[in-house]
C-alpha cells in the first residue's frame, strides 16, 4: 500500500475519556469510574499508535511523520497520572517527532491545577494548558455541577498566568460559557471583565451554552425546571465580548475563539483548515489521507478492540462535494481572514455567494475579493447561510 500523501505537519489528538463527574450540559464521550484504569488505557493508546504506524492498515501514517501539534482532550486529561502520560508521550516521540515549536496542549480542570502539576507538565513537554473555568460565579458553577468553585478557579488562573509570564508555558487558554440559565448580560460581562483584567490570558474560548439531547440539562429544559438559552441574548453576549476583548488587544479569529497576537490555537486551526490529523483513544475521530474514522467510544470495548485489531468502528472517504462543503463550513468559522475561494468554489457557488453578499451576510475581502467572510449578521444566521452551500 502506498504511504498517504500530505500528512507532514500532522495534528495528533488523544482522547482521555475519564472524569470525576459529568456536568449537566456535557454530552462528550466520557465515563466516571471509581478508579481510572490509567495504566491499561495508556497501554491501549500505545497499542493503537502501533496500528496507526503499520502501513498494512487502512488508517495509517508514515513513521517519523512530524507533528505540528499534539492535543490531549477529554474527559479530564488532568486526571491522567503524570507517569502514565509521560510514558505515552515518550512512545509518541519515538515515532512521530514534534516539529520545533510544536504546540502541545493538555485540557485541565481547575481543581487539579497546582504548582507541582504545572512543573510536571512542563517537564513532559506540555507547553499549553486549556483550562475549563466556565464561570467565576459560585451559583453558576453549582448549577452546572462543576467540581470546582470560584476560589479554585482563581487559584488555577493565577498559577497558569505566572507560568506563562515566566515563559514556562508558551500559552494557556481559558474556557467560559455564556447564556447560562438565569445569567444576565451584566453578569456575563462582569465575569469576563474579571478574567481579562486580572489575568490577561493569551487565549480565550467562549462558548454559547447549547442544550444537547442526551444531557441532564436537556431533561431539565423539557421539564421546565430551567429555561432554554435565548438565542438573541446569547448573540448580544457574544458581540459584547468581542467589543470588550478587541479593546484589550484580542482578535476574534474564530466563532468561539479570541487570541492575543501570536497566540492562535494551532491544533484547532488545523480542524478549521481541514488539515489531516491523527486521533487516538476511545471515541476519537480522525482525518487521514482523505478518510474519516471513528473509534469505539466505550473505553472498555476500546481496550478490547486494540488487543485484537484496529479500534475504529467506522471509516469513510467523503466524496469531493462533501469535502468541499466541509472546507467551506469550517473555513467560514475563521472570522479574521475568511475563506479563500478557489476557481472551483466560484464556479459552483457563484449565485449563492452573490445572494448572501446582497443580503449582507457575506462580504468579499482582499484586494481582489479572493476570500469571503461572514458579517455580523452572517454570524447570527450562520446555519442559514450554510444551508445555501449544502451539496
Image (spheres, rainbow, N blue to C red):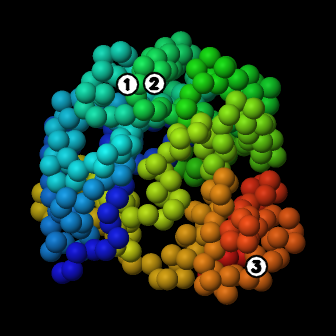
Residue furthest front as drawn: 367
As rendered, which of 262 and 43 lies closer to the eye?
262
Mark yes or no: residue 82 visible: yes
User: At 27% across and 56% down in the image, what residue appears?
Assistant: 66
| Count of marks overlaid on the render | 3
Coordinates of residue 204 in the picture (x, y in percent): 58, 36
As rendered, which of 93 and 216 lies closer to the eye?
93
Please state, as top left, top right, bottom left or bottom right, where the N terminus lies in the image.
Answer: bottom left
Mark 2 in CB contact with mark 3 (< 8 angstroms) = no
Coordinates of residue 275 in the picture (x, y in percent): 44, 63
Label 1's element? loop
User: Distance between the Cα atoms at labels 1 and 3?
Assistant: 48 Å
Q: Which residue is mark 2?
A: 164
Label 2's element? helix
Please state, as top left, top right, bottom left or bottom right, where the C terminus lies in the image.
Answer: bottom right
60 vs 318, left or right, is: left
| Label 2 Cα neighbours within 10 Å, binned few <14 / some 14-19 / many ≥20 | some
228 vs 328, left or right, is: right
| Label 1 Cα neighbours within 10 Å, binned few <14 / some 14-19 / many ≥20 | some
Tell which circle, 2 or 3, labels the residue nearer the N-terminal end: 2
In the figure, 357 relative to 169: above or below? below
Q: Which mark is residue 168?
A: 1
User: At 66% across and 42% down in the image, what residue appears?
Assistant: 251
Q: Which residue is mark 3?
A: 352
Tell which circle, 1 or 3, labels the residue nearer the N-terminal end: 1
Amino acid at each position: 500500500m502506498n504511504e498517504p500523501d500530505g500528512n507532514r505537519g500532522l495534528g495528533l489528538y488523544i482522547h482521555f475519556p475519564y472524569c470525576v463527574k459529568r456536568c449537566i450540559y456535557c454530552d462528550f464521550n466520557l465515563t466516571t469510574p471509581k478508579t481510572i484504569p490509567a495504566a491499561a488505557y495508556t497501554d491501549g493508546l500505545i497499542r493503537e499508535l502501533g496500528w496507526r504506524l503499520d502501513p498494512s492498515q487502512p488508517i495509517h501514517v508514515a513513521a517519523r511523520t512530524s507533528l505540528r501539534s499534539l492535543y490531549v482532550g477529554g474527559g479530564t486529561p488532568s486526571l491522567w497520572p503524570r507517569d502514565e502520560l509521560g510514558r505515552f508521550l515518550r512512545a509518541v516521540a519515538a515515532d512521530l517527532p514534534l516539529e520545533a515549536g510544536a504546540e502541545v496542549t493538555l485540557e485541565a480542570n481547575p481543581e487539579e491545577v497546582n504548582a507541582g502539576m504545572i512543573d510536571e507538565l512542563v517537564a513532559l513537554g506540555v507547553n499549553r494548558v486549556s483550562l475549563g473555568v466556565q464561570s467565576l460565579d459560585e451559583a453558576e458553577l453549582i448549577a452546572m455541577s462543576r467540581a470546582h468553585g470560584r476560589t479554585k478557579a482563581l487559584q488555577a488562573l493565577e498559577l497558569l498566568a505566572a507560568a506563562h509570564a515566566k515563559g514556562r508555558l508558551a500559552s494557556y487558554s481559558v474556557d467560559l460559557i455564556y447564556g447560562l440559565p438565569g445569567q444576565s448580560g451584566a453578569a456575563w460581562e462582569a465575569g469576563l471583565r474579571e478574567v481579562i483584567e486580572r489575568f490577561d490570558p493569551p487565549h480565550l474560548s467562549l462558548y454559547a451554552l447549547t442544550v444537547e439531547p442526551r444531557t441532564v440539562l436537556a431533561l431539565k429544559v423539557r421539564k421546565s425546571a430551567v429555561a432554554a438559552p435565548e438565542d438573541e441574548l446569547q448573540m448580544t453576549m457574544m458581540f459584547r465580548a468581542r467589543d470588550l476583548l478587541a479593546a484589550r488587544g484580542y482578535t476574534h479569529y474564530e466563532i468561539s475563539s479570541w487570541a492575543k497576537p501570536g497566540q492562535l490555537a494551532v491544533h484547532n486551526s488545523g480542524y478549521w483548515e481541514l488539515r489531516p490529523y491523527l486521533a487516538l483513544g476511545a471515541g476519537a475521530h480522525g482525518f487521514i489521507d482523505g478518510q474519516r474514522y471513528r473509534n469505539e467510544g466505550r473505553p472498555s470495548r476500546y481496550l478490547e478492540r486494540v488487543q485484537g485489531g484496529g479500534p475504529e468502528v467506522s471509516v469513510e472517504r467523503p466524496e469531493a462535494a462533501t469535502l468541499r462543503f466541509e472546507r467551506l463550513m469550517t473555513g467560514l468559522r475563521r472570522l479574521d481572514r475568511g475563506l479563500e475561494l478557489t476557481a472551483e468554489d466560484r464556479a459552483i457557488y457563484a449565485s449563492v455567494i452573490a445572494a448572501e453578499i446582497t443580503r449582507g451576510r457575506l462580504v468579499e475581502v482582499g484586494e481582489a475579493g479572493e476570500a469571503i467572510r461572514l458579517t455580523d449578521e452572517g454570524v447570527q444566521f450562520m446555519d442559514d447561510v450554510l444551508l445555501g452551500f449544502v451539496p
